[in-house]
Amino acid sequence: MSDACIFCKIVAGTIPAKLLYEDEQVVAFADIAPQAPVHVLVIPRRHLASLDGLTEADRPLVGHLLERVAHVARLLGVAEAGYRTIINTHHDGGQEVYHIHVHILAGKRIGPMVVR
């Protein structure tokens, strides 16, 4: 666990979160500042700082993470209507917490992404 990482603290249970799914490798919880009616974060239990830092050794965990994102979307009942997934990477990519996480946004029609 990274001492300063808020997501590691959620995984450890030292910071409360509304957990929606968990297994031995990943945890899913409601975002505290939702940008859509459904806004969930899915994170690996193991600290991985960013997508850019992944190595070949991380493939099994990241594969599981992405498969579980789809599973969580189905559990939430949003898979059939559709959802957006986002992984922000580094400062210019909008990453605020340096623990890889996948956003699931759903519950309304989400228009095309526009970068301004």
Image (spheres, rainbow, N blue to C red):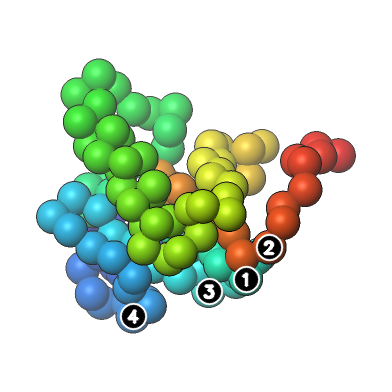
Which amino acid lies under the numbered mark 2 shown in the image of this protein? Lys
Of residues 112 and 87, the one nearer the viewer is 112
Can you tell which of label 3 and label 2 is closer to the viewer? 2
Question: Label 4's element?
Answer: loop
Q: Which residue matches tag 2?
A: 108
Can you tell which of label 4 and label 2 is closer to the viewer? 2
- Residue 92 coordinates in the image, percent (x, y): 66, 37
Which amino acid lies under the numbered mark 4 shown in the image of this protein? Pro
Residue at point 13%, 55% (across, down): 24
Residue 53 occupies which quadrant of the picture? top left
Residue 81 occupies which quadrant of the picture? bottom right
Can you tell which of label 1 and label 2 is closer to the viewer? 2
Q: Which residue matches tag 1?
A: 37
Categorize mark 3 by other alpha carbons within 10 Å: few (<14), some (14-19), many (20+).
Answer: few
- Check the image and name the residue furthest to the front: 80
- Residue 18 coordinates in the image, percent (x, y): 38, 78
- Residue 79 coordinates in the image, percent (x, y): 48, 53
Spatial separation of the CA atoms under disc 4 and disc 2 = 27 Å
Spatial separation of the CA atoms under disc 1 and disc 3 = 12 Å
Spatial separation of the CA atoms under disc 1 and disc 2 = 7 Å
Q: Which residue matches tag 4?
A: 16
Question: Label 1's element?
Answer: loop
Residues at marks 1 and 2 touching, judged by CB atoms closer than 8 Å: yes
Above or below, 2 against 22 in this view is: above
Residues at marks 4 and 2 touching, judged by CB atoms closer than 8 Å: no
Residue at point 42%, 37% (across, down): 50
Categorize mark 1 by other alpha carbons within 10 Å: few (<14), some (14-19), many (20+).
Answer: few
